[in-house]
Amino acid sequence: MTKILILNGAQPYGFAPGGLNATLAGRAKERLEAQGHDVRLTTVADGYDVEAEVESHRWADAVILQFPVNWMGVPWSFKKYMDEVYTAGMDGRLCAGDGRTAEAPKANYGKGGALTGTRYMISATFHAPSEAFDDPAEPFFEGMSMDDLLRPVHLNAKFFGMTPQPSFGAFDVMKNPQVDADLVRFDAHLDSLFAEVGHVAA
């Protein structure tokens, strides 16, 4: 049995109430529990206890970060969660400082993470179409992938010693949504990582 923490980082707005992210987070919880995994789900916008969230990160074998991309990053409420929870965990529970030592004060920055046995997966929703990424001819992202865009999220996880799993993206969700197809892809993505009970794929 794998212990999985799901973080729904959506921030509801009138024009984007966060329904798709809630659906994906809830669907992941239901599907993973049906496969025998132990799952905790935190919906950031509903509030959270900082100490409980630190302990959930320590408890988890895997963390799923579910969020819409707002202005090229995570929503402000999810960033606030990270600021509060991750800062609290810098007392040695999530990381031992920033990895540097008095003997080598310029080396190994970002290598003090305590979650070295934990894996993570980004699942993000985008207003942008998938065609905007991975194409040098597209003038905005200029060949960047979704993981390139979300590099700060990956670096946050790396700071705590977590190991990445393949990311999932749902694209063009406002102007040209393909929700049914996205859910089929999402199920397959989860199964590829977690279908074997007790095992998390590398």
Image (spheres, rainbow, N blue to C red):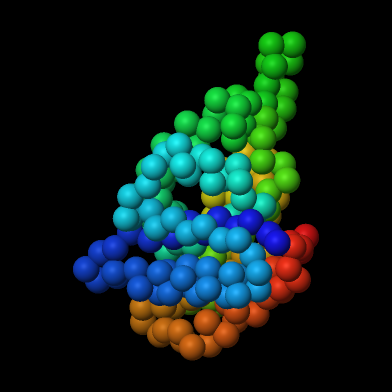
Q: What residue is shown at x 57% (from left), y 45% (from top)?
A: 57
Farthest residue to the left: give it.
Answer: 14
Q: Position of residue 152 (x, y in %)?
A: 54, 47
Q: What residue is shown at x 53% (from left), y 33% (from top)?
A: 89
Q: Position of residue 193 (x, y in %)?
A: 70, 68
Could you say which is closer to the camera, residue 17 or residue 27? 27
Left or right of 174 in this view: 107: right
Q: What residue is shown at x 54% (from left), y 29% (from top)?
A: 90
Farthest residue to the top: give it.
Answer: 103
Could you say which is closer to the camera, residue 8 or residue 122? 8
The image quarter in which residue 96 lies: top right
Up/down of 60 relative to 173, above or below: above
Up/down of 110 relative to 15, above or below: above
Q: Position of residue 7 (x, y in %)?
A: 48, 56
Any part of residue 123 in sight: yes
Left or right of 7 in this view: 3: right
Quarter of the image with the N terminus in it:
bottom right
The image quarter in which residue 121 lies: bottom right
